[in-house]
Each structure stands twice: as structure tokens, then as C-alpha cells.
Image (cartoon, rainbow, N blue to C red):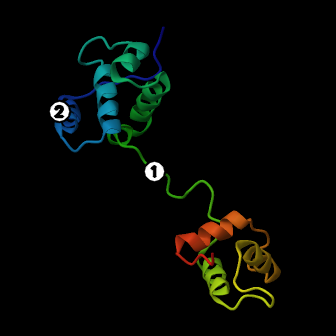
Amino acid sequence: MNKKYHVKLSDIERGYVQEILTNAKTPKTFRKRCNIILLLDENAGVPATQEEIAKRVGVSDATIYNTLKEYNDCGLEYALHYNKPKEPPVSPMVTGEKEARIIALACSEPPAGFSRWTVRLLTERVIELEIMESVSRETIRTTLKKRNSSPI
């Protein structure tokens, strides 16, 4: 059966990977990826199967496949290091301006008939003042808690 992806490390690349492995400050995930690349290297002999490598390194078959694919598509450096996404998958509901307005509201005088603000009252007032179109009490609570501005 023909393999779709191949790993053929030069002596310099192999030395670089082994240097990363021997560094005491290398994170565990990088070490695992280094071991995967070294075990998949065809220049060092016949590589083990993905299942055998998964057992030896302690990762899933999908991790082996993804590392192999990243090596072939983007190169050694990309395959070894985990790349965080540039932006979070979901943007935050409460931005800086909205957060400031919510905190200012919480620090203001409570409505008539109340001795202090409650999270429920703040939620209603935020929607009333159109600071946010819709918002849950939990969002208001965590926003205030994050800045130690909790009215409770």
C-alpha cells in the first residue's frame, strides 16, 4: 500500500529534533511530537506503524496522522510546535466600552426602593439602557466579578 505522507529527515534536522528532546525546558507536547517525527523517519530505517508509535509515545492515532500531515504540508518547525489560533473561536460579548458602562452603572445609585444593586436589577437596566441587546445575569455577574465590582 502506498503511503501518502513521508518523513525523511536530514542529519541536521535529526540533530535539531534530538536537541529539542534533550532540553530540560521542552514541554511534554513538543517532546511527544519530536518522538513521533523521529519514529516516522524513513532515513533512520523502516518506520514503525502509526499504531505502534501511538502506543510507544502515548498519544492517539489522530495525533500521529496530524503531526505527519503538518510535517509534509508546512515543514518540521510547524509540525513540532503547537500554534495557537490568532483569535478566540467566539468573540467576547462584553467589550471594553460595554464593560465600563456596566461597571459605572453598578457603582451608581440604585433605583428608588432598593438599597443596592442586584445582578438581576443590573441585567434589566443594561437591556433597558440598550448597552447590550440581550444579556444573561451570569454575564453581568462575571463582568463585575472580574473587576471586583460586585454589588453583592
Label 1 belongs to which residue?
Answer: 84
Judge left or right: residue 26 versus residue 133.
Answer: left
Q: Residues within 10 Å of mark 1 (few under 14, many from 20)?
A: few
Q: Pointer 2: what residue?
A: 15
Q: Residue at x 52, y 75 (%)?
A: 148
Q: Residue at x 46, y 24 (%)?
A: 60
Q: Looking at the image, which is closer to me, 116 or 44?
A: 116
Amino acid marked by disc 1: Lys
Numbered tag placed on residue 22 in the rendering:
none
What SS does tag 1 mark?
loop
| Residue nearest the observer in this picture, 15 or 6 | 15
The residue shown at (29%, 34%) is 31
- Give the quadrant of residue 70: top left
Between discs 1 and 2, the one toward the N terminus: 2
Vertical position of residue 141 compared to residue 48: above or below: below
The image position of residue 138, as x and y in percent, is 68, 63
